[in-house]
Image (spheres, rainbow, N blue to C red):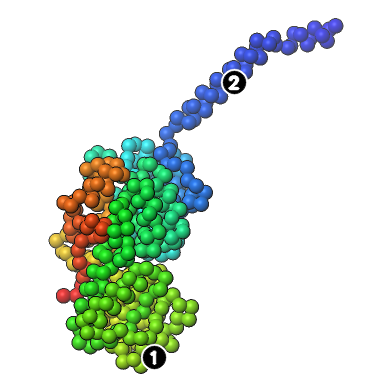
Amino acid sequence: MSNSNVTKKISPPPIVFILLLLGFGFGGYWWFQQQSSKPSILSNTRTLTSQNAGNISIGNQVLITEKLTPDKQAGVDSLARGDGNDAIAKFQASLQQNPNDPEALIYLNNAKIGNGNSLKIAVSVPIGSNLDVAQEILRGVAQAQDELNRSGGINGVPLKVVIADDQNNPEIAVNLAREFTMDNQIVAVVGHNVSNVSLATAPIYQQAGLVAISPTSNAVNLSGIGSYTFRTVPNIRTEASVLAKYAAKTKHLATIAICFDSTAISSQSFKSEFTDRFVSNGGRIANTSCDFASKDFNPALIMPKVIAEGTDGLLLLPNVDKINAATDMARANQGRLALIGSSAMDTHKTLQLGQKDVNGLVLNAIWHPDSDPTNPFAKNAEKLWKGVVNWRTATSYDATQAIISGLKQNPTRNGLQQAISQQGFSIDGATGKVKFLPSGDRMGDTILLKVHPSNSSTGYDFTPMP
């Protein structure tokens, strides 16, 4: 009996159980709501699909690991856990150590925005396959974002930038493009780098009504591919025409051998366009095959055949990821033939690998820091990045500025497309006045550069030709 009495004394009545359960339930719900309502700097970023998660960052992960500073990693870690103030301090400290890092500057500006109202764009670059080119493009976007946000944003709204690594791979880029279109907050894309990738992604942007402006894709068949695809670099037909005209006027360039990349659409386009124009002006194209993409590509075997044809010049048209093959060809040339090339050759790697073998190389470019001394962009860029930038940074800056200008008129996807498609639309950019044709092509011409010895780190540099 006593045991039974004890049990009754220590057992709470049923109502107590109910009250306790309700208390725990409401308490847990309140705690969850409080945690959920805490501001997260990444709260406006949609959940990424697993195949893209490692290739996209708004500041929550490092995509460029070269010269990674502890402060940059700490900034990314802070941003990922929602500590914006610490992230800002860490990114600022990292930029003090490495001011040439565009990823850190973009993340810094994103951290400053936090969860505040913003307009968001994406930039897709080949970090995994060509880091130099990726950073050149990112510097243009980062500089435009930094200048804009410092001056008050787009009608008072700052710009946030998402970085993506497409590795110059059409398959990866297509997945990323779909990711961009599903994020309704992304109002435009700067990209892609190579024409193969831009051609693969253009139908996706067209279907979703998302503007994409490429700063570097110049293949002929990208022209008119869709009403949402634009570019701030001229159609390759323009570039080929300028170079063919130069070659035709140069007396010692009667016969030219062409080395191209059969897997790169822009390289194929350039070869075709140059051939048409050069031959129509009385020139001759050598018969020797020289394909950078060929499995048996061997400069040592190709050059004797080219020389035997009585060739005067060698036109180098590599994909930007195959600059080493082009410089190998220049080395095998041993200064015997005059060298000319496309704008893809305008890279630091060309000078670094080519050295004296590319001395005298003449190539196309849309812009050079010395091409317009009255334009403040080059000096501003050199001050910001502590070094001279090239044409990819300038055209990427212009792509971003075109987007900014359009968004100031209408900050929506469709509104942006309508704004920059207007006949009277133009901006005064780094590369001059930027206007788009109905085809989405950039209006304008290119200039010629020549490699000369210099006091630079490589011993050589590109300089504008008179």
Judging depth in this view, the residue of 112 and 254 nearest the camera is: 254
Q: Is residue 161 above or below residue 343?
A: above
- Give 101 or 222, whichever is nearer the viewer: 222
Drawn side of residue 224 relative to residue 372, left or right: right
Could you tell whether 244 is left or right of 193 in the image?
left
Q: Secondary structure at mark 2?
A: helix
Q: Are marks 1 and 2 in contact (CB under 8 Å)?
A: no
**Quadrant of the drawing holding the N terminus:** top right
Residue 24: mark: 2
Q: Earlier in the sequence, mark 1 or mark 2?
A: 2
How far across and how far down the image is residue 212, in percent?
32, 53
Q: Residue at x 42, y 44 (%)?
A: 182
Q: Is residue 257 above or below residue 206?
A: below
Q: Reply above or below: 200 against 350.
A: above
Type of amino acid at the residue the image marks with label 1? Pro
In the rendered image, residue 6, in percent from the top left (x then y), is placed at 79, 9
Image quarter of residue 132: bottom left
Which quadrant would the C terminus be assigned to in this image? bottom left
Please give left or right for residue 375 compared with residue 54 in the image. Answer: left
The residue identified by callout 1 is 304
Query: Residue at position x 35%, y 93% from top?
Result: 308
Which of 443 and 318 lies nearest the eye of the viewer?
443
Q: Residue 294's spot in the image, x, y percent?
A: 45, 77
Q: Is residue 22 visible?
A: yes
Q: CA distance from mark 1 to mark 2?
A: 85 Å
Binning the other alpha carbons within 10 Å of mark 1 as few (below 14), some (14 to 19) or many (20 upward) gives: few
Q: What residue is rendered at 78% in x and 11% in y?
A: 7
Q: In x, y percent, where is residue 176?
A: 43, 52
Q: Quadrant of residue 331?
A: bottom left
Q: Residues within 10 Å of mark 2 (few under 14, many from 20)?
A: few
| Residue most extreme to the left | 374
